[in-house]
Image (spheres, helix red, strand yellow):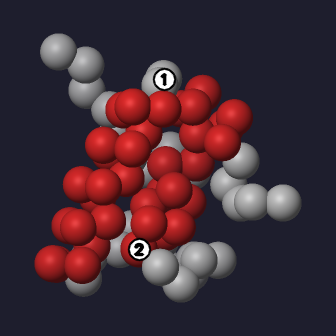
Amino acid sequence: MIYPSIDKLIKNVGSKFLLVNIVSKRSKEMEETDYYQLNEYKSSKNIGKTLEEISKGLINIKEK
């Protein structure tokens, strides 16, 4: 089973398109700044770490 589940991520974000954009931007930000919001991650890659942050509600989405 993949962690975190896509259903939980879509529930937090709203759409797959928005999820892909957020994950892309946040994972690039992690790579450039080395800023992480959690102390421990299950994933070793930045994309997985970003998905974990979204599933825990650490990334807020502002709608225009």
- In the picture shown, does residue 38 fall above or below 13? below
Q: Is residue 3 left or right of residue 30?
A: right
Q: Residue at x 36, y 32 (%)?
A: 18
The disc, 2 or 1, on the residue closer to the chain's N-terminal end is: 1
Residue 27: % across, % down: 32, 65
CA gap, disc 2 and disc 1: 21 Å
Label placed on residue 49: none
Residue, disc 1: 14
> Looking at the picture, which amino acid does disc 2 mark?
Asn
Towards the viewer: 38 or 14: 14
Which residue is more in the foreground, 37 or 29? Answer: 29
Circle 2 SS class: helix
Which residue carries the number 2 mark?
A: 46
- Residue 5 percent coordinates (x, y): 71, 47
**Above or below: residue 44 compared with residue 19:** below
Q: Residues within 10 Å of mark 2 (few under 14, many from 20)?
A: many
Q: Position of residue 62 (x, y in %)?
A: 25, 26
